[in-house]
Amino acid sequence: MALFQTLKTAAGVWNPLLWLIALAVAIGIGLYIRSRGRADSRQGPAREPFISGNPEPENAGAHIPATNLYWGFTEALKGWYQKLLPIHTGVLTDYVAWFLGVMALTFIIALAG
């Protein structure tokens, strides 16, 4: 059958039957790993949040500020972080504008080179 024959090209070899077998094996392994999980872990809609292995702070509920979780990251990059903090507005359209500006600059540099 021509549908499952190996196609040899300059870029490599393509055999749809082998890819289907590999996909079936990957799905089987995934289902096996999922079946080994705890069945009682999905009880109820509310579960305890994972806080990087730290105990939940008192009177904080499920809200953990980023200053607690990312302290090492912000402390290590404090010089950069302090420069970026004033331009951080939290408005999505500002981030899209920055993204488009950086992409435009990238294209200009790429086309000039």
Image (cartoon, rainbow, N blue to C red):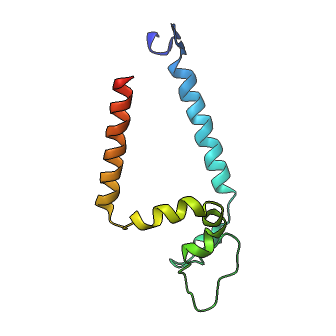
From the viewer's perspective, is residue 1 above or below residue 110? above
* Image quarter of residue 89: bottom left
Q: Nearer the viewer, residue 29 or 94?
A: 94
Quadrant into which the C terminus falls: top left
Residue at position x 53%, y 21% in the image: 17
Residue at position x 58%, y 61% in the image: 79
The image shows residue 101 at horizontal and vertical percentages of 32, 45
Q: Residue furthest bottom?
A: 59
From the viewer's perspective, is residue 18 above or below residue 82? above
The image shows residue 37 at horizontal and vertical percentages of 67, 61
Q: Nearer the viewer, residue 20 or 54?
A: 54
Residue 50 showing in the rendered view: no
Q: Is residue 3 left or right of residue 67?
A: left
Q: Nearer the viewer, residue 87 or 62?
A: 87
Q: Nearer the viewer, residue 99 or 79?
A: 79
The image shows residue 112 at horizontal and vertical percentages of 35, 24
* Image quarter of residue 67: bottom right
The image shows residue 56 at horizontal and vertical percentages of 65, 82
